[in-house]
Image (cartoon, grey):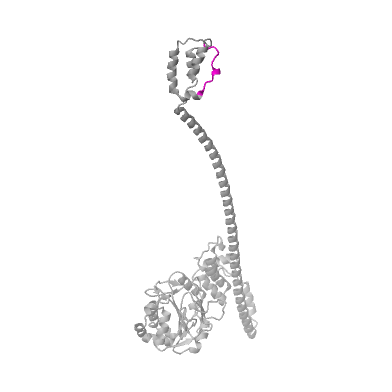
C-alpha cells in the first residue's frame, strides 16, 4: 500500500521514473519488513510538497525517511522488559526493606516491653524472698533471745534457792561469813570461764551450734562462725557480743553433762548410727545430755570408730541393710550382731530395762522410767503402736532384763524358724520373743509418738519419744519444744 501511494505521488509531481528500479529494490526490502511497516502507517501529509525540490529529495530521501522507522526486534523488547523488571525489583526491594525495618522495630519494642516486665517480676520476687528471709532471721533471733532468758531465769532461781539455803545455814551458825562474802565480791573476776551444763551460756552455745548455724548461717555475718565451728569458738563469739552471760572460754575439753543419777528403774540405752546426719545426732545428744545419753548407761554402735566428746563408738562389721517385705529396712542381721555383742558383754545385766533407740528418735529417758517401773523384774517387752495391729515399732524398743536373758539363751531357735532376712529387726524381735514366751505389754498412752503411728506432735510434754527427726536441728527443736 505504501509503495502504491508513493508511485501515485511521483506521477502527480511529474517526476521521472528513472529510479523505479531503486524503488523495486526498496519494495523487496519492504516485503521483508511486512506488517512492521504497516504498523508505522506513514501518513501522506508527512511527505514534502515537492519531493524534487525538498532537501534530500529523491529516492535517497525516501530511504532516509524509512530509516527513522526501523522495526522493533525481540532483543530490544527483551531489553526493555529487563529494564522494567530491574526497576520493579529495585522499587520492591526498597519497599520491602522499609517494611522489614518497621517490622523489626515493632518486634524490638515488644521484646523490650517483655524484658522490662520480666525484670520487674524478678525484682518483685527477689524483694519478697528478702522480706521472708529477714522475717525468718528475726524469728530465729527472737527465739534465741527467749531461750537465753528462760535459761537465765531458771539458773537465777536455782542460785537464789541455794543462796537462801546457805544464808539459813549461816544464820544458824554465826555471823562470821559476812566479811568473807564481802571479800569474795571484791575479788577480781576470772580471766576465763568455760560454760558448764545448766548455765545460760551453755544452753545458748548449744542452740547456736545445732539450730542457729544450721538453719541461718548467713545471720552471723563476718563472725567467722559456721556449722563446723566448735563450742569454744561459739562461746567466744557470744562473749564478744555480750550475750547469754558468756565469758571468755578457757582452753581444754568443752564439758558435757554427767551421766544420769541412779534413779530406779535403771535404763541401758543404745543406738546403731552411721556416719553423716545420724552421727551428728549422736554428737548433739552427747553435748546436751539428751536421748540415749539421758539413760543410766548408753552405747553407740557403728561401723566407724568415732570419738564423740570423750566417748568412743563400738564397732560392728556393717550397718548396711536391705528392704523388708513391709517396705522398711531389712536390718535384722545388723541388729542380731549388735544384740549378741551387747548380751555377751554382760553390761546390760546391771540395768532393769534395755532400750534400742533409733538416732532420729527423740527419747525422754525420765518419762520412759515412769512407763516401765511397774514391770521391773518381769519377763516382758512393750508394744507401742496399735494403728493397724498391736505392734512394737522400731523407733524405740524396750525390753526387760529377763526378756533379754530369754533371747540370749534361745535366739538360735528364732533364727532357724523365722524369715529374719526379709523382716525389719523390730518385727523379728517381736515374733521371736512371743515364740519364746515373753509377755507383750500394750502401752499406747503417751508412749512413742511416731509419724506412722499416732503422729509426732512436739508440743506433747508427756510422750516418751518422737520419731522421725533425721535433721539435727529439727531433732533439737522438737526436744526443746516438748521439754
Residue at 55% from the left image edge and 41% from the top image edge: 99
Residue 203 appears in the rendering:
yes
**Between residues 42 and 188, which one lies in front from this camera angle?**
42
The segment highlighted magenta reads: 40-51
Residue 424, by quadrant, is bottom left
Most common SS among magenta residues: loop
Q: Is residue 212 above or below residue 351?
A: above
Q: Position of residue 288 (x, y in %)?
A: 52, 74
Residue 263 appears in the rendering:
no
Number of marks: 0
Q: Position of residue 267 (x, y in %)?
A: 47, 83
Q: Quadrant of the C terminus?
A: bottom right
Q: Position of residue 276 (x, y in %)?
A: 45, 69
Residue at 43% from the left image edge and 16% from the top image edge: 24
Q: Position of residue 325 (x, y in %)?
A: 40, 77
**Between residues 124 and 286, which one lies in front from this camera angle?**
124
Please state if 302 lies on the left or on the right of 202 as rendered.
left
Residue at 56% from the left image edge and 47% from the top image edge: 107
Residue at 65% from the left image edge and 79% from the top image edge: 178
Q: Is residue 448 above or below residue 236?
A: below
Is residue 194 one of those drawn in magenta?
Answer: no
Amino acid at each position: 500500500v505504501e509503495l502504491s501511494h508513493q508511485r501515485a505521488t511521483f506521477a502527480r509531481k511529474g517526476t521521472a521514473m528513472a529510479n523505479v528500479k531503486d524503488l523495486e529494490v526498496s519494495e523487496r526490502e519492504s516485503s521483508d519488513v511486512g506488517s512492521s511497516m504497516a504498523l508505522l502507517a506513514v501518513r501522506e501529509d508527512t511527505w514534502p510538497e515537492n519531493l524534487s525540490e525538498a532537501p534530500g529529495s529523491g529516492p535517497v530521501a525516501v530511504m532516509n525517511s524509512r530509516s527513522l522507522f526501523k522495526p522493533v526486534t525481540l532483543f530490544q523488547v527483551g531489553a526493555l522488559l529487563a529494564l522494567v523488571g530491574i526497576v520493579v525489583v529495585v522499587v520492591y526491594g526498597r519497599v520491602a526493606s522499609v517494611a522489614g525495618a518497621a517490622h523489626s522495630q515493632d518486634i524490638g519494642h515488644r521484646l523490650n516491653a517483655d524484658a522490662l516486665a520480666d525484670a520487674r517480676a524478678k525484682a518483685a520476687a527477689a524483694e519478697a524472698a528478702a522480706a521472708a528471709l529477714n522475717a525468718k532471721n528475726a524469728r530465729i533471733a527472737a527465739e534465741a533471745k527467749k531461750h537465753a532468758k528462760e535459761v537465765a531465769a531458771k539458773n537465777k532461781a536455782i542460785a537464789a534457792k541455794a543462796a537462801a539455803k546457805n544464808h539459813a545455814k549461816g544464820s544458824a551458825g554465826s555471823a562470821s561469813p559476812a566479811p568473807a562474802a564481802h571479800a569474795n565480791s571484791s575479788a577480781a573476776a576470772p580471766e576465763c570461764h568455760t560454760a558448764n551444763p545448766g548455765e545460760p551460756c551453755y544452753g545458748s552455745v548449744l542452740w547456736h551450734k545445732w539450730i542457729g548455724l544450721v538453719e541461718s548461717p548467713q545471720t552471723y555475718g563476718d563472725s567467722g562462725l559456721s556449722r563446723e565451728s566448735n563450742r569454744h569458738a561459739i562461746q567466744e563469739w557470744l562473749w564478744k557480743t555480750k550475750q547469754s552471760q558468756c565469758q571468755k572460754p578457757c582452753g581444754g575439753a568443752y564439758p558435757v553433762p554427767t551421766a544420769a543419777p541412779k534413779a530406779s528403774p535403771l535404763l541401758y540405752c543404745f543406738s546403731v548410727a552411721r556416719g553423716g546426719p545420724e552421727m551428728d545426732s549422736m554428737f548433739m545428744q552427747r553435748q546436751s545430755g539428751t536421748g540415749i545419753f539421758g539413760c543410766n548407761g548408753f552405747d553407740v554402735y557403728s561401723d566407724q570408730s568415732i570419738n564423740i566428746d570423750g566417748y568412743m563408738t563400738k564397732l560392728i562389721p556393717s550397718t548396711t541393710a536391705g528392704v523388708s517385705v513391709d517396705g522398711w529396712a531389712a536390718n535384722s542381721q545388723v541388729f542380731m550382731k549388735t544384740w549378741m555383742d551387747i548380751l555377751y558383754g554382760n553390761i546390760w545385766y546391771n540395768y532393769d530395762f534395755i532400750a534400742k533407740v533409733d538416732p532420729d528418735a527423740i527419747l525422754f529417758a525420765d518419762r520412759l522410767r515412769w512407763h516401765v517401773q511397774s514391770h521391773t523384774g518381769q519377763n516382758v517387752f512393750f508394744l507401742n503402736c496399735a494403728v493397724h495391729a498391736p505392734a512394737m515399732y522400731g523407733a524405740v524398743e524396750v525390753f526387760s532384763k529377763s526378756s533379754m536373758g530369754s533371747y540370749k539363751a534361745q535366739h538360735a531357735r528364732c533364727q532357724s524358724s523365722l524369715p529374719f532376712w526379709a523382716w525389719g529387726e523390730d518385727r523379728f524381735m517381736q515374733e521371736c520373743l512371743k515364740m519364746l514366751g515373753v509377755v507383750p505389754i500394750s502401752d499406747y498412752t503417751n508412749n512413742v509418738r511416731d509419724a506412722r503411728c499416732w503422729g509426732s506432735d512436739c508440743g506433747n510434754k508427756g510422750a516418751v519419744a518422737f520419731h522421725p527427726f533425721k535433721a539435727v536441728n529439727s531433732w533439737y527443736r522438737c526436744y526443746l519444744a516438748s521439754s
